[in-house]
Amino acid sequence: MPFDARGLRNALGRFPTGVVIVTAFAPDGARIGMTVSSFNAVSLDPPLVLFSVHRQALTFPVWQQVDCYAINILNEEQEVLSNQFAQAKGEKWDGVMPLAGVTGVPIMPNACAVFECRAHARHDGGDHEIFVGRVIEVHDHAVSRGRPLVFFEGRYPRSPVRRPPTTVRGCCSSAWMVNPAGRSESETKKVRRCRSTKSTRNFTPST
């Protein structure tokens, strides 16, 4: 039986996905970001992940020039933030106070986990382009991650049992870091904890 684009989209929507916001600095120094559900793991050795961007997206040419970016996995308390960065235009960063990653890219506070990546490859994906990134830093926020934000059939279904969100102040941790210097082919795994002298403000996305 033949199918149309709407039928294909509806069928694909039966597959629940997580939600991420990809963030970076444009070549002119402006912060950019977009909500994506096409995030996926590719390889552990070397550590590679991917996401895709629609070729008609307003910032598509900018993403093609980005050398480093962060992939922020959202928790279910960040639904408003997901919608904010899903819009094509507008002040996406309004009310957001990003942290600085080890590569300097902006990362989202209180995300479940954050992958800092260097651009590794791009591939044709039909009406999308597939961006493959090499992971050079992982921030795994085990205490504050909460439940992941899930997208299913065009909406965010909620679990019937929810834990209250927990905010960690002045703490960031990396459960796995890959040598960012790139001086060796071997990947370095280590646990690192750092504490800031400043407290991290409760993250409340603007509406």
Image (cartoon, helix red, strand yellow):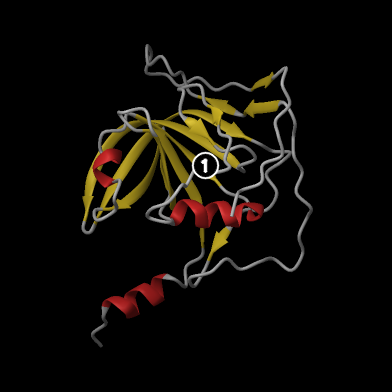
| Horizontal and vertical percent position of residue 44 | 44, 36
Where does the image place residue 99, in percent across and percent down from the top left? Answer: 57, 29
Q: Residue at x 71, y 39 (%)?
A: 202
The answer to whether 80 is drawn above or below residue 156 in the figure is above
Query: Foreground: 31 or 169?
Result: 31
Q: Is residue 102 above or below residue 123?
A: above
Q: Position of residue 39 (x, y in %)?
A: 43, 50
Q: How many marks?
A: 1
Decide which of 67, 45 is in the foreground and name it.
67
Q: Tell me the quarter of the image containing the C terminus.
A: bottom right
Quick one: SS at disc 1?
A: strand
At label 1, the amino acid type is Asn
Which percent across, then down, holds residue 25? 39, 31
Judging depth in this view, the residue of 92 and 175 nearest the camera is 92
> Residue at image x 37%, y 55%?
88
Residue situated in front as seen by the camera: 106 or 28: 28
For mark 1, does the 10 Å Cα neighbourhood hold few (<14), some (14 to 19), or many (20 or more) residues? many
* Residue shown at 61% from the left, 48% from the top: 205
Q: Name the side, left or right, on which 190 lies relative to 197.
A: left
Farthest-out residue, top: 183
Question: Relative to residue 132, is residue 103 drawn left or right?
Answer: right
Q: Where, quadrant-wise, is the N terminus in this rendering? A: bottom left
Locate residue 129 relative to residue 48 in the image: left or right. left
Q: Residue at x 57, y 60 (%)?
A: 150
The residue pinned by badge 1 equals 72
